[in-house]
Image (tube, rainbow, N blue to C red):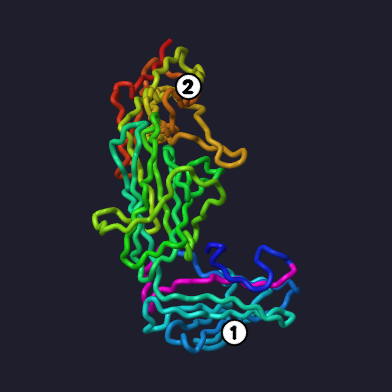
């Protein structure tokens, strides 16, 4: 829950440590009675109270006003006592309804209509008898913010400009009152920075955070945020992505989401919401989502041959080199399969540290071949694999570059135009 949507009484949660306090959200949205749908990853209701006057029981009371008995009801847990409109719990000096068993949960009453609301009062009585209060307005129904987020865009020229509209709608039961937006690019760059968005410094210009506190989105309403998002795609990378996250300001971005702080505003035009017609054919995603951009490029991977000379029983250490000849970085879609010559045995292989000072084989082996993941390589980079073998009689083994299974429908691999250098020989001779 955003800090601005909390109500508090007593010392602030981040203030003087010797003062008791209670905090609760200013607004919280409830599912209608019996309805388990709604936004995913929703921030749970959070009620926190603290009294630093030593150990011992305190009391927490939740009360529903008489005028709201048909809107919300209380459910009691963890030894709390009372009715559907008034519940009292004995709680610890450091209380949180997330971690402590005693709690009074507010739910929508049977028959309550979407849009109905009620203010519930929480009273925290300290060890010394001081009463602190916090209030939350519970609203029946929830705003559900969705953004157009196509899974992928194909065939984009490397280094070109890409324009992407930001389209948002509310599919919930109640209005969105204030909209939050976070734009993130991975591999590309913003070519235009909005004047009313922040660009946090730690993210080095790859994140924009925008808030529209005065925007109201009625249920079913769609808006386009203009001007559209403009990006510069990379020249030497095959895959890039951009993401848009959207949320109702008084709900927050989600239980496990964070909003980057700080940053200066951009020097471009302001981002403005404009009413939009129906977008029934577009890929709306609740909370927003990522779009993967597949650039019109490729990577030529090459594995180099190895020649080993010696008598049977000799030990030889060598490197198998896998090189990306470019022109693009395509991630890590390739494995190396090494089949030693008949009679030649591997005695040492690449290792990886998975814990402090603890190692395990980097490659997988079925007894006759070694399969090794090739790390992501920029154009011109090489991944070496060092092996030590005991030589057998003269003969030849094989080196093969093998494509991994696509990770998703948009994953087209490396589009290697020259697969002739995907194989090579490990030759043993005297």
Residue drawn 51% across the image and 20% down it: 317
In this rendering, which labeled residue sits more in front, label 2 or label 1?
Answer: 1
Where is residue 98, by image quadrant? bottom right
Q: Nearer the viewer, residue 384 or 72?
A: 72
Which of the labelled discs sits on residue 269, or is there none? none
Where is residue 188, by image quadrant? top left
> Does residue 88 appear left or right of residue 69 in this picture?
right
In the rendered image, the quadrant that contains the C terminus is top left
Which residue position is annotated with label 1? 88
Q: Secondary structure at mark 2?
A: strand
Number of other residues with Cα within 10 Å of mark 1, as a class: few under 14, some 14 to 19, many 20 or more:
many
Res. 285 in view: no
Residue range highlighted in magenta: 18-40
Residue 90, relative to residue 286: is it above or below? below
Mark-to-mark CA distance, 2 and 1: 72 Å
> Does residue 3 appear left or right of residue 229 in this picture?
right
Residue 281, relative to residue 86: is it above or below? above
Q: Secondary structure at mark 1?
A: strand
Q: Residue 383 in the image: state x and y as whole percent.
A: 46, 27
Residue drawn 42% across the image and 53% down it: 245
Q: Residue 261 in the image: state x and y as whole percent.
A: 55, 51
Which of the labelled discs sits on residue 319, or is there none? 2
Q: Main secondary structure of the magenta part?
A: loop
> Does label 2 or label 1 sit earlier along the sequence?
1
């Amino acid at each position: 829950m955003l800090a601005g949507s909390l109500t508090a009484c007593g010392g602030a949660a981040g203030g003087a440590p010797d003062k008791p306090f209670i905090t609760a959200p200013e607004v919280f949205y409830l599912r209608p009675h019996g309805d388990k749908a709604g936004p995913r990853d929703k921030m749970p209701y959070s009620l926190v109270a603290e009294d630093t006057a030593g150990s011992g029981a305190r009391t927490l009371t939740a009360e529903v006003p008489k005028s709201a008995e048909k809107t919300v009801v209380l459910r009691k847990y963890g030894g709390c006592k009372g009715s559907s409109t008034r519940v009292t719990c004995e709680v610890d000096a450091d209380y949180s309804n997330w971690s402590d068993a005693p709690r009074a949960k507010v739910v929508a009453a049977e028959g309550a209509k979407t849009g109905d609301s009620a203010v519930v009062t929480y009273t925290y009585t300290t060890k010394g008898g001081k009463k602190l209060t916090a209030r939350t307005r519970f609203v029946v129904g929830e705003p559900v913010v969705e953004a157009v987020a196509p899974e992928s865009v194909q065939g984009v020229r490397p280094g070109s400009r890409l324009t992407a509209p930001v389209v948002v709608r509310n599919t919930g039961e109640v209005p969105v009152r204030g909209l939050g937006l976070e734009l993130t690019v991975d591999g590309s760059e913003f070519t235009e920075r909005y004047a009313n968005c922040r660009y946090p410094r730690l993210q080095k210009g790859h994140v924009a955070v925008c808030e529209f506190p005065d925007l109201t989105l009625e249920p079913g309403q769609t808006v386009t945020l203009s001007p559209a998002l403009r990006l510069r795609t990379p020249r030497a990378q095959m895959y890039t992505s951009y993401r848009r996250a959207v949320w109702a300001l008084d709900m927050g971005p989600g239980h496990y989401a964070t909003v980057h702080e700080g940053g200066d505003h951009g020097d471009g035009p302001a981002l403005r919401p404009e009413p939009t017609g129906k977008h029934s054919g577009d890929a709306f995603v609740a909370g927003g989502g990522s779009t993967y951009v597949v650039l019109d490029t490729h990577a030529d991977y090459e594995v180099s041959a190895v020649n080993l000379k010696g008598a049977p029983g000799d030990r030889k250490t060598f490197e198998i080199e896998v090189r990306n000849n470019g022109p693009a970085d395509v991630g890590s879609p390739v494995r190396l399969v090494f089949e030693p010559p008949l009679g030649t045995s591997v005695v040492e292989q690449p290792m990886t540290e998975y814990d402090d000072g603890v190692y395990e084989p980097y490659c997988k082996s079925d007894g006759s071949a070694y399969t090794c993941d090739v790390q992501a390589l920029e154009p011109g980079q090489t991944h070496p694999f060092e092996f030590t073998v005991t030589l057998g009689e003269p003969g030849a083994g094989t080196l093969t570059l093998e494509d991994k299974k696509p990770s998703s429908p948009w994953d087209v691999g490396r589009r290697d135009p020259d697969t002739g250098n995907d194989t090579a020989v490990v030759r043993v001779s005297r």
